Structures are given as C-alpha cells and as structure tokens.
Image: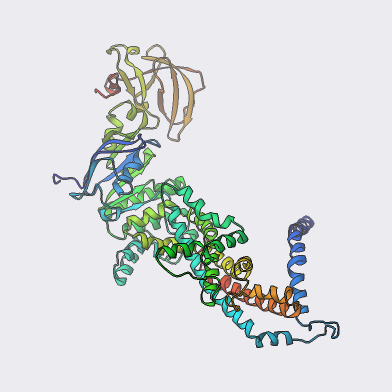
Amino acid sequence: MTAAPYVRLKGIAKRWNGQLGVEDISLDIEEGAFVALLGPSGCGKSTTLRLLAGLELPDEGTIHIDGRDVTTSAASDRNLSMVFQSYALFPHLSVAENVVFGLKVRRVPRAERQEKMARALEITGLTGLEARKPAELSGGQRQRVALARAIIAGQRLCLMDEPLSNLDAKLRNAVRKDIKKLQRDLGITVVYVTHDQTEAMSMADKVVLMKEGRIQQIGSPDDLYNRPANTFVAEFIGAPPMALMPSAQVAGFDENLTLGLRAEHVRVVPRGQGRLSCTVSEAEFLGSETLIGLDCAEASGLSVLLPGLRVMPEGEHVDVTFDDENLHRFDPSGQRIG
Amino acid sequence: MSRHVNIERRRQAIYGWLLLSPAAVLLSLFAFYPSAATFWSSLFSRGTRRNPSEFIGTENYADLFADPTFWLVTKNNLFYAGITIPVSIIIALAMALWANSKLPARGFLRTAYFTPTVLPMIAAANLWLFFYTPGLGVLDQIGALFGLPSVNWLGQPETALWAIIIVTIWKEAGFFMIFYLAALQTIPEDLKEAADIEGASRWTYTRRIVLPLLMPTTLFIMVNAMINSVKLIDHLFILTKGGPSDASKLILYYIWEMAFAFFDRPHAAAMTMLVLGVLCVVAAIQFFYLDRRTHYQ
C-alpha cells in the first residue's frame, strides 16, 4: 500500500448557524476499500458524505481525493459518482437516458455512450428495460438504475447515501450482496452511509461509527464488535447490544470502571453458583437460538443466548456467570482501557 | 352476476351522475345554451322596424369576410397574441427561476412580482395611462431628462398596440410566475445534486431537467395565455378604445362595439362563433399534440 491514501479528510468541520453539523472529522480511505459511515440519525454521516461529494463546503479542514486537494472544488470536478437515498432519477427520462445523462453532459461520443450503457445495464441486470420511465419500474429496479448511473462513467470513487433504505427487507439482502460484488468486481472505492449496522458490518472493510457529529471509532467490523473504543460503540454495535455494569457491583475490580459484557459470553448456571442473580424480563425466539432478556440490579441490558427454543417464563429467577477475560473495561469517561 | 353487484353498480352510476349534475346544469345554462343560441342568431339578419329579422344562412359570415376592419382586427389580435403569449411565459419563467433560488429577500421579490396580478385590469390600465400620457406621463418625464421629444404612445397607430401589449405582459407575467413557482417547488432538490455530480452546468440542468418537468405547467399557462389574449380587453376601454384608427382594436372589443355600439347583434354573433371555433381548434392542438409529449408526474 502506498503512503498516501486515496481519500483523505483532515480536520473537517461544518456548522450551521452555530449548530453542530460535523466536527473534527479525519478519515483516510485506501483505494478499493468499502467504507461504511454508520451512526444513529442526525449523527452527521450524511453531512460527511455530502462534504466529500462537494454538495456542501466545509468550514474547516481539507479534503484530498487521489492526491489532489478538492476542498473547494465543484462536485463535478471530484471524479466521483453518487447514489442517492431517493435515487434522484430524472422522472421524465427513460432508463437509458437517465443512465447516460452524465456521459451526454460530458460530451462522450455516441458510440462509446451506447457501448458503456449496454455494459452498465448488463452488470445491473437492467437489459431490456431501456425505454421504461422510472415510474414504470419497481423499487428494486429504480435502485439498480441509480447504480447503473453511478458506475457507467467508470469513476473510481462511488458515494452511496443509504441506498437500500427504501427497499423491503428481502430485497435489501439481495441488493446488499449485489453492491458488494459490484464493488469488488469493478475495484472501486465505495463510501457508504447507513444507519443499519447489519449493512455496515456485513459489507464494509472499514466502519466509521459516528455520534453527534464526531467520529467514535474507525475500524474493521471485528474491531468494532470485539474491541469497542467506548461505551457508545459498545452499546450501538451488536444485537443485542453489549450490557454495561458499574465495576463496583462485581467483585475483584477497581471501582469507577464500567464493565461491558456480550450476550454470547453469559452462561446460565444452577442457583447459588452464579456471579449475578437476575430475573427473566422477556424471551425472544430467534430460530436457532433464544434470546433471554434479564433484569438485574447490577447491570443494565443484560441478556443471554440459549441454543434452540428455550422460552423461560417471565419473572423466573436465574443465576448467570461469565469469565473475566470476556469483559470489556471502560474508564469513567467511557473510553476503553482493555 | 349476482344481484347485489348489479345494485351496487347502479348505485355507483347514480352517485356519479349526482356528482356531475351541478356542473352540468350550470355549464349548460351559462355556456352551452348561450353558445347554441349565439350560433342560431348568427344565421339571421338584423331586424329593423321595416325589415323583420329573417333567416339568411351564412350571409353574416360572408359580410365579415368582406369587412376590412374585421381583417385588421384579426391581424391585430394575432400579433397581440403572438407577442404577449411567448413573452409573458418567458418572463414568468425567468422570474420564477430567480424567485425560487436562495435569495435574501425572496418573500419580498415574490410579492412584488405578484402585485400586478392582484390589481384589477381597469386599475392597472389607469396606472399605465399615467405612465403613457404625453407630457405629464412618467415615460415622457424620464425621456425629457435625456432630452428626448414627447411621444404620444397611445395616440399614434405605430405605438398604440405595443403600448397595450406591454400592459398585458406586465399584468400576466406575475400571475403565470406563481404557477411556475409552485411547479418548481415540486422538483426535488436532489435532482439538482445528481446533475451537479454528473457535471451538468446550471444551463444544462435547466434545459434538460427543469424545463421538461415544467412542461405540464407550461401547457396549462399556454392555454390560459391564449384565452386571455382574446378575453382580456378591459384595458382597451381605458387606454385607447381601439384607436387610433383601429390600430389597437382587438377582436373581442370589436364584437362588443358591433353588438352594443352599432347594435348589430347578428354580425357580433357571427364573429363570436368564429372566435369560438378558432379557440377550440387551437386548444385541441395544444392538448392533443403537446400533451402527448409532456411528462406528467
């Protein structure tokens, strides 16, 4: 890997009327990477993407793409493509006209345009729908038109703003795989905004988790899940999220720490042998396993996964235990210490 | 088919006719019947005390075609329509595009553009009379500052029709702008962003995306502007009364004159029928030809 990353955001800030948009965003993206910007709504992930696209200009900081400073460049000069959440298809143009719009604007010769369009439509499985108007397509097909429009020009950087949020759950799964395959086959760099952690964790090489305009953690899905940088990440990532408890409640730890524990590391043990004593608050059958939610004086959000169908009645007392090596430790400010 | 389906269907039909009837009754009473009556009376001669009215077929129409004033008025009106329709549409569109952009005084701008529409045409005409009056008028006063001679804009055949045209455009453009403004606000912001990323200039975006999406509105405005170019004659009464020497006379004004100044109802009726016929044909062309090439969302 060369020294300079393909995309570099450095100290980016954007504020609206003094209100926080994003603050101190620094992010390096290698060429060919699939980066997901993840976070709850209003965390600034879309703003970050729009700053990168050139649809907004940052108040502070610099943006480099492919070694070029594009901080104040127009969107069209950044050599990137974008898929919008609403798809932003031109409603009066046919599929073919929508897809080649950018090439036409850039005065690409007709023959080349036709050739590229045929290929883009083939890749996205839209061949045969050239003459349709967007209104005559299903949601999934529209989504693919937006994808075709994004890949036709052969830009090496593609930005996607929640491209799957308007699809139903089943289609979302299928398209998720298609996008990932597309990205790998074409070798393009993708920056992908989503609020759905399943999307981010399953597709991305690198996940950027944001909250209130600031980056909380940048890392691989494995890092975020197994080594959360702070309590926010711990509670955001994973279903169910990590349970947190003050260390004073658990024997053998310094006070003032927060301990984190994932459901898969909790074991139910016979009464009297557990480290914590809880009552069952809910039981959720997930198919291959059952998720038991626990009420516990010491810890909030504690739950345990049991194999198969193991519905426990609400209010039943259970004792649980866990190993110290599976505990995540956070200092009083919520930062990870081990 | 079972019985309840039949009853339900009949109920729906009755319901539909009931909803339709108020409009049907009013239209028949005040539009269809008068049209038919006008057509009928255009086939009779003008009755005087000595010669009672009698059926003369198309003679009234033949008279009109032989009347040089009729042709002059027709020519005036075509010219008037040919200028006012495109110019007011273009100005309305330009104003709407501007008033739709992110400006500091956007609300004020919109109100200012819309003001002429709120004024009654008679009031507007009086206002413009004040502009056009030779010597005292604003135009002459400004001209005098630059040492230009006084011009009687409304009083000479070469400028009278132009003066009328300008008043009409001034009056209509703000009204049409409101329609464009409403249509512009239905175009999602992200289309502009998508076009930006594809490298489309502002002009390309306007021409390839905005204008086609505004076509339904343009069509609506065109029909309205066309009707207005025949219908709107209030300002003629104030400004020129069709003069001088018929230079600014429009067809509806001539019809009014024929019927209520010369008391020649049959010829007025014949002329009305001709106008109706032409309007129908043009509206049909606009709807059936342009409609097919228009994208409706």
Asked if residue B58 shows in the view, the reply is no
A197 left or right of A8 in image: right
Residue shown at 31%/60% (left/top)?
Answer: A152
Instruction: Judge by depth and name the residue closer to the eye, B126 or B3.
Output: B126
Which residue is rendered at x = 52% and y = 67% of the image?
A: B134
Please say if A117 is above or below A31. below
Q: Quadrant of residue A241?
A: top left
Give the percent coordinates (x, y) of residue A57: 30, 45
In the rendering, at what x and y percent does residue A262 appear? 35, 26
- Residue A61: horizontal and vertical position, in percent? 24, 40
Visible residue check, residue A71 = yes
Please tell me which residue lies in front, A93 or B124: B124
**In the image, what residue occupies the spot 73% across and 61% down?**
B23
Q: Is residue B279 left or right of residue A14?
A: right
Seen in the picture, residue B38 relative to A268 is either above or below; the reply is below
Displayed quadrant of residue B207 = bottom left
Q: Nearer the viewer, residue B273 or A254?
A: B273
Q: Position of residue A156 (x, y in %)?
A: 25, 54
B245 lies left or right of A133? right
From the viewer's perspective, tell me whether residue A140 is left or right of residue A15. Answer: right
**Viewer-closest of A261 and B188:** B188
Q: Is residue A184 above or below residue A290?
A: below
